[in-house]
Amino acid sequence: MSWHVASITLDNLDELPKRCRSCVFWELSEHLGKQAQDFGSTEFEKEAWVSGVLLEWGSCGKIVHMQGAPAGYVMYAPPSAVPRAAEMPTGPVSADAVLLTTMQVLPEFAGEGLGRMLAQAVVKDLTRRGVKAVEVFGDARPGTEPSCVIPAEFLKGVGFKTIRPHPRWPRLRMELRAAMTWKEDVEAALEQILGTVTIPLQSEPSIERQVIPAR
């Protein structure tokens, strides 16, 4: 099955799943997020946030297409651009890290290895830009709201390590220098691992993960 990964821009933002297109969990503080929902302006706020990060920092997400159809996406940004990060109990994010906020794969594309492919795309992009590390708030109890926090077990499966434990919102980190070997291994064996890892939308809370032996 043919696939293609592209940077998220204002031109393809509407290709995100409908629920994700209007989700501003990370993009606004809790208070302002509720106001945006009340006023029905969440899609506008999402677009404004993406526009601002693109202008001030650069690429802040990737979207993957399978057979030409949007199949999943991932978003990331400097922690200073992510208001909700300051409200997480295991913050703050380290000053030398970029924050990975969310990753979703559409249920109909589950089992195609897109979660690992998107994680690889983040590592490749940020390594090229000289970023030292990526951090992320994981969800230790996936399947409940909010649905845009990445399951912690998936993150551990692709190389993230817990640096601040929490019963619900642990903070995890990946050193990009250490991730280089992992990234190269993934690139070399991508066709072999497709189908072994997936991260579905939270309507399907389980994560299928097969441990791949280290070389």
Image (spheres, rainbow, N blue to C red):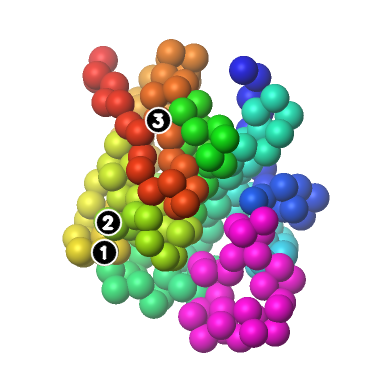
Pointer 1 local density, CA inside 10 Å: few below 14, some 14–19, many at least 20: some
Q: Horizontal and vertical percent for residue 71?
A: 62, 37
Residue at 30% x, 50% y: name it: 152
Examine the residues drawn in magenta and state their main secondary structure: helix
Q: Which residue is mark 3?
A: 197
Can you identify the residue that label 1 sits on? 168
Could you tell me which secondary element the residue under label 3 belongs to?
A: loop
Residues marked 1 and 2 touching at CB (< 8 Å): yes
- The verdict on residue 29 being magenta is yes
Q: Residues within 10 Å of mark 3 (few under 14, many from 20)?
A: many
> Which secondary structure, mark 1?
loop
Q: Residue at x 70, y 25 (%)?
A: 67
Left or right: where 46 falls relative to 154 = right
Quarter of the image with the C terminus in it = top left
Residue 77 locus on image (x, y percent): 53, 58
Q: Earlier in the sequence, mark 3 or mark 1?
A: 1
Magenta residues? Answer: 18-44
- Disc 2 target residue: 140
Work out whether mark 2 precedes mark 3 in sequence or the reverse, and give the earlier one.
Answer: 2
